[in-house]
Image (tube, rainbow, N blue to C red):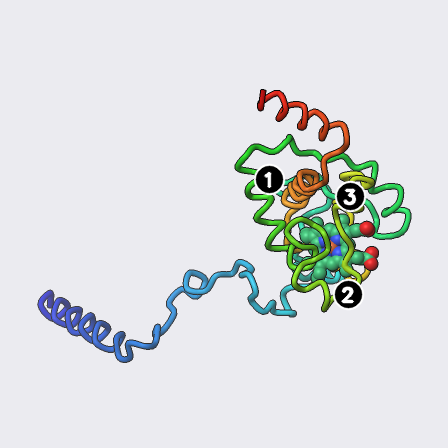
Amino acid sequence: MKKIAIISTLILSAAIVFTSCRDKRETGRAYMPDMAYSRAYETYAQRDSSIFTTDPKDAGHKIFYNNLSPAGTIKRGDLFPYTVPNDSNGLINLSNQVKNPLEPMTGKELEEAGRLFNINCAICHGEKGEANGPLAPKIGGVKSIIAASPGFSDGRLFYVMTYGQNNMGSYASQLTKEQRWRIVQYIRTLEPKTAATETTAKADSAAAKK
Ligand code: HEC
């Protein structure tokens, strides 16, 4: 009796082993589908509308998911949300009240900010911000950054990058808040030296020659 049980178990297992690998391209039967297929929401996956909803009204009987982080939360290490509205009051008044939250740049950060400026801005504004980038004639109306920036607050420069201005698009999705503030700092290094710094520089070089 025992023998029969052992033999039939062997035959059964051999049958399972051989039939389970019929086609190498197929996964075969999923014994536990929950382990084979993730139930979590996958990036870019199509959402099953019978399970998920983006409408808060359906939130009771479906899973509400709208891709946004919960209100009042920020990503770890991120800067505070920028709440200045995209309108004329935002541009002319409110933008100026926002201070650059970053510490002054170190050499490495300056290099990175320059790299970001050359990738994102120089194509229109030119490497020195003088409105002479290769794309400037095609876009039309490109303004000199350094002609205007000495009169602009850091907050206003950040505002223009965040929302764009006329023919210039927004850079909010290409550059993080931190990167935009770094570019603001970089623009300050491009600005022509004021008369005061020029005289000290001249005096310094004159002193060095002596
Ligand atoms: C596709 C071309 C293009 C790119 C790229 C571009 N800009 Fe502009 N930018 C413009 C144009 C055009 C204007 C003029 C908008 C207007 O009519 O007021 C402008 C205006 C500005 C102004 C305002 C100048 C003023 O006098 O009001 C600032 C500051 C500025 N850009 C900064 C930047 C920075 C920083 C970047 C990179 C993150 C950048 N721009 C990328 C086209 C561009």
Residue denoted by label 1: 76
Q: CA distance from mark 1 to mark 2?
A: 40 Å
Q: Secondary structure at mark 3?
A: helix
Earlier-in-chain disc, 3 versus 1: 1
Which label number is shown at residue 149? 3
Q: Does mark 3's beta carbon lie closer than 8 Å to ligand 1?
A: yes
96 in relation to 24, above or below: above
Residue 140 image label = 2
Residue drawn at 60 percent across, 44 percent down: 113
Answer whether labels 3 and 1 touch (C-beta < 8 Å).
no
- Please indicate, yes or no, whether residue 170 appears anywhere in the rendered image: no
Q: Nearer the viewer, residue 68 or 19?
A: 68
Q: Quadrant of the C terminus?
A: top right
Give the percent coordinates (x, y) of residue 207: 62, 20
Q: Nearer the viewer, residue 146 or 8?
A: 146
- Residue at 34 percent of width and 76 percent of height: 26
Residue 198 x %, y %: 71, 30
